[in-house]
Image: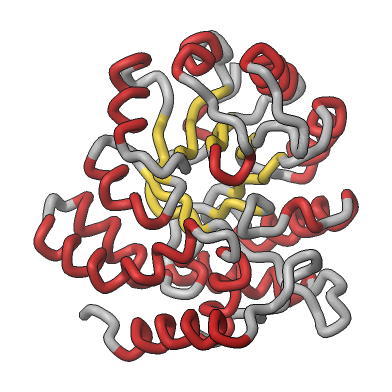
Amino acid sequence: MPNPMSCNWSGVYPAATTQFDAALALDLAATQKVQAALIKDGVHGLVLMGTVGEGNSLRAAEKRQVLAAAVEASAGKVPVIAGVSEFTTDLAVEFVRDAERLGADGLMVLPSMVYVPTAAELEYHFRTVAAATGLPIMLYNNPPSYRVNIDVPTLRSLASVPNIVSIKESAPDSRRFTDIYNAVGDRYVLFAGLDDIAFEGLVLGAKGWVSGLTNAFPAESLMLYEALLAGDLERARRVYRWFMPLLHLDAEHDLVQSIKLAEQVMGRGSERVRPPRLLLTGARRAEVLAMIETARDNRPK
């Protein structure tokens, strides 16, 4: 049985971005620089190649390169969680075996891409992937993006799989945290996965936060988490209210472009994205840029 404590399943885990050069080739040096900077800033772990990390825009070899770079950047200082986002169960199995070999500390497993599974198919996918590895697994539930919900009966059934230890909950309904707890107790370590319900998720029992905007504002993300951990709700509310206009970006269809633009404004990375995503332009770019600059110029102390 894997040791779930091989990952420190708590704290702020940025959904780290993947960096591209001017020709939109993978910029591995810049990607590793982003990873190393986040670790230096004090985050508690890294999540790679999920939605914000553009996992579905990467070739198979590139995914393995990004993971290897993060393992090197971390050097054991924080857990490295590899996103598992594949079209088929067989491809996911192949990737998790490689991820374990490359030194990942854990896995964040998504439903199979494009195909919308039944509950039985979803459970089969997760069970089969989990059986292929000794690494601990976080399930990623994001119904708005991936068109499938990991329902409570499925979570009850999967409780028998020992290395499925955590859930990243990105449903836009904070009631899910309580519903899951009432159904299965503390069987799974819950993470808030949608930035603009992070406060609610952490107050309702989540132990950590997988965050997009931490890429641009790591100090403030840690400030929010630490205030909640200390029970300082007044300070946490103040930080959250300052942060909320940006956190809402994480729930929009162009979240990757917006987060990477924020990263660029804050001098932490490039806004380049791979098509079919395109850079923000026109009124939308101006709107997001104004939000970022307002936040930058009024940061909480």
Is 289 or 195 nearer to us in this picture?
Answer: 289
The spot of residue 135 in percent (x, y) is 64, 30
Instruction: Say if residue 96 shows up in the picture.
Output: no
Q: Name the residue located 29 percent from the left edge and 82 percent from the top edge.
A: 299
Which of the 4 image quadrants contains residue 267?
bottom right
Is 196 or 60 nearer to us in this picture?
Answer: 196
Is 65 or 5 nearer to us in this picture?
Answer: 65
In the picture, the quarter occupied by the C terminus is bottom left
Classify residue 28 as left or right of residue 187. Answer: right
The spot of residue 41 in percent (x, y) is 44, 71
Q: Name the residue located 84 percent from the left edge and 75 percent from the top edge.
A: 24
Which of the 4 image quadrants contains residue 44?
bottom left
Farthest residue to the front: give it: 283
Classify residue 166 as left or right of residue 63. Answer: left
Which of the 4 image quadrants contains residue 138?
top right
Is 76 or 192 nearer to us in this picture?
Answer: 192
Q: Name the residue located 32 percent from the left edge and 70 percent from the top edge.
A: 243
